[in-house]
Amino acid sequence: MKQLITVHSHNCNQRSGFESSQQNRMNLAKLLNIPYIHIVTNPQDENFEDKFKKMGFTDATLVSLGRSLFSTDAIMENPYLYYYERDNKIIAKAFYDVDCEYNVIPMWMYEYFGDNSSDHWLCSEEIALVKILSNTPLLDSVVIRDESRFPMPVLKRFLRNKNVPYFEYIHYPVITEEWRKCLSKKTQYLVANEEVARLLKDLGYHAQFFPPMCVEDELKPRIMNNCKSYVWSGHFGPYKRFDKALTIMKQLQNTGITGITLDVYGGDKDSFKEACDMIGGCPSNVSYKGSVTKVPYEKYDGYLSTSFNEMFANSCVEAMSQGLFCMVSDYPYPYKTYSEATHNSVKTNSSISEYVENMLKFSVQRFDSKIQQDFLKKYSYSVWALKLKNLKSIWKGVKYGL
């Protein structure tokens, strides 16, 4: 492999999720001295490159589908409609086909008006992507699309005819969410969870585990005499159950025992305030720190998660790599897996009262991170850089039944 290409939709104004996974691939490619191209398939404004670099895409060639099509950048009318101008004249637009008028699945549509009717054309995000890739050197490339729930058969057929290895990345627990009906046994998948990859393989899918993030080869263990300062890292979507985290902190506050705190990174201030209002106000032991490119895990003793729908739990792995004590839910994977593999160093909890009890217990108890950091060696950059390099060979082996 001489070039790695990632394809993904990104919100124009903020993080959309999976950026850390894509940056992980970028870092692995850098270790291998392989160029990394990041193709953004939804409309982006003129500052999109700066925004992506601030998000951490510092070693990527960034490609906007709209700019490649129209040689100019998008102007947002609303989140579902963008226009493209040249010489103060609207030359094109992009709109989200949410009602599936043009496709069987919702996706972006790109429309060029032209100077006369013969120049006018309309195409889907998928066809636009094929247009761009047809003008991109693809020899010895591997393409990974960060979406498995919405098939793109034209793209897959185009790359197969070009003999270009193509993988779709599974970020969701497709077994339990019934997204499996969208999967194909003719597509090769990279999966963010080892157990889900195994289950899919048993069902006849071409699925293999590939971690959405890696850790440094050398990690520094920490020994703490108590765990009092916790960090929350993530958005406030329903499955993260941030309201539950706030309730836990409120109950800790009500015990009268001081010193156990939670700093919150991610989401936005309005969403944070809305979540606090749901439980009658922000507990005094919780502080909102905003959305940052890099969470300073090293400043904290512990990591708190109440999520019930994860695959790899990137932020938990990041916290473990920095030696934090992780207080998490009892969701089957990955938390129970991490807990069992680290001899209960990662602490699972089934109820709010259990969280409160354990956080009080470990506020006066010694914690050594060595066991969990030894476990994380399996996700090190050196291990997975070689496996990324071999993706093309794996693809060929599946394609030709080797």
Image (cartoon, helix red, strand yellow):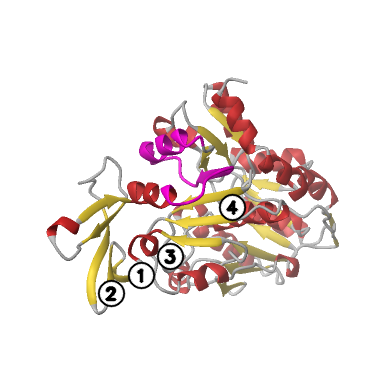
In the image, is 382 to the left or to the right of 245?
right
Q: Quadrant of the N terminus?
A: top right
Query: In terms of depth relative to the viewer, which is nearer, 385 or 69?
Result: 69
Mark 4 touching mark 3, by CB under 8 A? no
* Residue 357 visible somewhere in the drawing: no
Q: What residue span does the magenta drawing correspond to?
A: 134-163
Element carrying mark 1: loop
N-terminal label among 1 and 4: 4
What's the residue type where badge 1 is placed?
A: Thr
In this view, the mark in front (1 or 4): 1
| Mark identifier at residue 86 | 2
Residue 92 in the figure: left or right of residue 262:
left
On residue 278, the disc is 3
Mark 4 lies on residue: 21
> Of the residues under marks 3 and 1, which one precedes in the sequence?
1
Question: Which amino acid lies under the numbered mark 4 shown in the image of this protein?
Answer: Ser
Looking at the image, is mark 2 or mark 3 earlier in the sequence? 2
Please give the residue where the numbered disc 1 appears in the rendered image. Answer: 72
Q: Check if mark 2's residue and mark 1's residue have beta carbons within 8 Å.
A: yes
Badge 2 or badge 4: first in the primary sequence: 4
Q: Name the residue located 60 percent from the left edge and 57 percent from the top edge.
A: 23
Q: Is residue 298 above or below residue 158?
A: below
Q: Nearer the viewer, residue 118 or 311?
A: 118
Can you tell which of label 3 and label 1 is closer to the viewer? Answer: 1
